[in-house]
Image: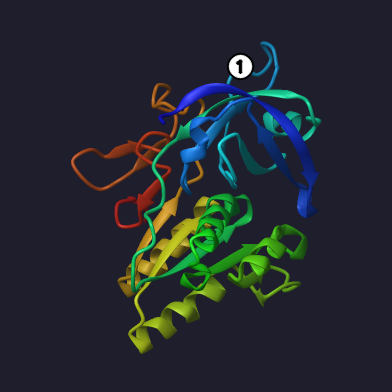
Amino acid sequence: MTAAQFEVRVEANRRLSGGYFLLELAAAAPTPVADAVPGQFVMLRGEWGRELLNPRAFSILDAPDATRFSILAKAYGEGTRRLKRVEPGDRLVTTGPLGAAFPRPVAGVRDLLVAGGVGLPPLHFYARMAQRAGLSGHVEMYYGGRDRDDLVLLDDLAAWGVAANLATEDGSAGVRGYVTAALSPRLDAAARSGEVVRVLACGPTPMLAAVRRLVLERGVQAYLCLEENMACGFGVCLGCAVPVYGAKPYRYCCTDGPVFDAREVRWP
């Protein structure tokens, strides 16, 4: 199935710590999101009238069956504030799944999932799919936030048997510092032992830039799921340009990404 526009009903709006909320959404019939893979996203819009014309983009957190999926969000602007207030039974218009996804697991390669803040969803989805495939031991999560409350859904990872390595800026959970403080020694240990690892990361741009520097210095393969403002999701508005190396100086997060090879992104 390809991307399509359809209506969903809010089944639950779960409030989590740190201002996060989790929307569980369901459609009346099977949707293309049933075939979504980690890294892809949907565009959501409520009955907002003329005040907010554009939908908002969200990575898919999970898609447990043909009619249901969930997203994780935090209220940063008017669109997310309105979504935070939705109640069970409310209707949302959805378009998706959209975008390029993370690569599939590779035999003999251990995936290090690196998440920061609201960058958790595609990596949570990846860990969930690994668990469903009996590959929980194939992945490790490296998850950073400002403080303990900024780290959510940890119980899921524990239930799936996925190792979680935490970092907080205030030291209230895991190592003190950014998530790279937990990732860097792991990469060095892999280099010493000859273990082949791959990094899949999503989070704020400064975090992704720091992860990119770490992996390029060590020659580690990595894929970055970028966080850009995407007003349309189809490459029409051209508002989510990403600087890249190659014949063209820019590609677009919504159609060419949001997942990019770390070597491709043209950052300092």
Residue 153 placement: quadrant: bottom right
Q: In the drawing, does residue 37 fall left or right of residue 21?
A: left
- Tag 1's secondary structure? loop
Q: Nearer the viewer, residue 190 or 78?
A: 190
Tag 1: amino acid: Leu
Image height check: is 164 above or below 78?
below
Please state the horizontal and vertical placement of residue 2, each as a whole percent of the image.
41, 29
Residue visible at 33% across and 85% down? 194
- Image quadrant holding the C terminus, namely bottom left
List x then y, in percent, for residue 239.
Answer: 44, 29
Question: Where's residue 140, x and y in %?
Answer: 52, 70
Foreground pick, 12 / 205: 12
Residue at the outermost bottom position: 193
Q: Is residue 75 above or below residue 163?
A: above
Q: Nearer the viewer, residue 44 or 52?
A: 44
Residue visible at 50% across and 64% down in the picture: 113
Residue beneath disc 1: 53
Q: Outermost residue toward the top? A: 50
**Other residues around mark 1 within 10 Å, as few (<14) / some (14–19) / many (≥20):** few
Residue 76 in the image: above or below residue 55: below
Query: Which residue shows up at 41% across the image and 31% down it?
Result: 1
Point 56% across, 68% down: residue = 142
Visible in this render: residue 265?
yes
Question: According to the image, what is the colour scheme of the structure?
Answer: rainbow
Q: Position of residue 163 (x, y in %)?
A: 59, 73
Q: Relative to 91, is 121 above or below?
A: below
